[in-house]
Image: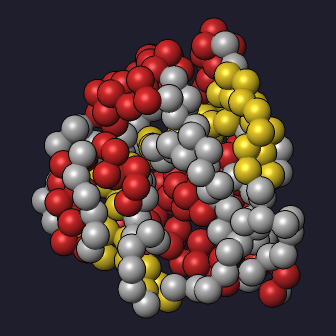
Amino acid sequence: MPSLPTAMTIAGSDSGGGAGIQADLKTFAALGVYGTSALTAITAQNTLGVTAIHEIPTEVIAAQIEAIVTDIGADAVKTGMLSSSAVIRTVARELKRRRVTRLVVDPVMVAKGGDRLLQEEAVEALRTVLLPLATVVTPNTPEAEVLTGMTIRNNKDAREAARRIAAMGAKSVVVKGGHLEGREAVDTLYDGSGFQEFTAERIPTKNTHGTGCTFASAIAAGLAKGLSVPEAVAAAKDYVTSAIKADLQIGHGHGPLDHFWMLRRG
């Protein structure tokens, strides 16, 4: 029997299970990829918010990455919560050392409930150290505004933000449109030479906890399986839209996506 494609997530935990490492691994499993993980932080988090954060020592983060890559391997890697410049620099160093060539960077800055997950001092390290290694960067509009210093109000602004982020060294950029106004959610992909837009209906639900983690992980899963960047983004958009539409009812706040919606509809 052939082996499964592999993907590694380097991110923080979510004790509620809707985001972070837990959402990433659920996404990999749902999409037929063998998932592994390197934990960067432990958070006490549920659908209502984040109540505590404990950053993992950088030497332990590096050891986790080495343990995975030197044994199981990683056809693609996705990064999520990297809370400080020390963590970002450690992860970037290890990815370069291990010659990772398919990297999806989800520039996680703020949790769904508004809690800050990226220290302000770490933004410059994210721009200058990690983004130049990225195959795809997947900021939402508030994250793209922080990275570029510009205001994003429409799709034209999203295109300009994508250009600016690509100029930081990323091969491709997807500026997600979920925070913009409009009847449809439009994600804008820029590959350094041209644009593609991926459109889906806007679904009226508060249960969107972990959308960003899930989208980036789904792209990584697609890349691990040999899809091109546009193909991986299109497949991820369809997967996330269906997971939101399933409207899973868990918790008392912003509930998680239904990562295994296919099984429940099967």
Q: Quadrant of the C terminus?
A: bottom right
Side of 233 where 67 appears, left or right: right
Q: Residue furthest top?
A: 59
Q: Quadrant of residue 244?
A: bottom right
In the rendered image, residue 142, in percent from the top left (x then y), is placed at 40, 55
Q: Is residue 168 left or right of residue 66?
A: left
Q: Residue at x 65, y 55 (%)?
A: 113
- Residue 254 lies, in percent from the top left, at 72, 66
Residue at 77% x, 65% y is 253
Q: How is the image coloured?
A: secondary structure
In terms of image quadrants, where is residue 245? bottom right
Decide if residue 194 is in sight here. yes
69 vs 226: above or below: above
Image spot of residue 181 (x, y percent): 39, 80
Q: Nearest the camera: 196 or 162?
A: 162
**Is 216 above or below relative to 63?**
below
- Residue plotted at (55% across, 58% down): 212
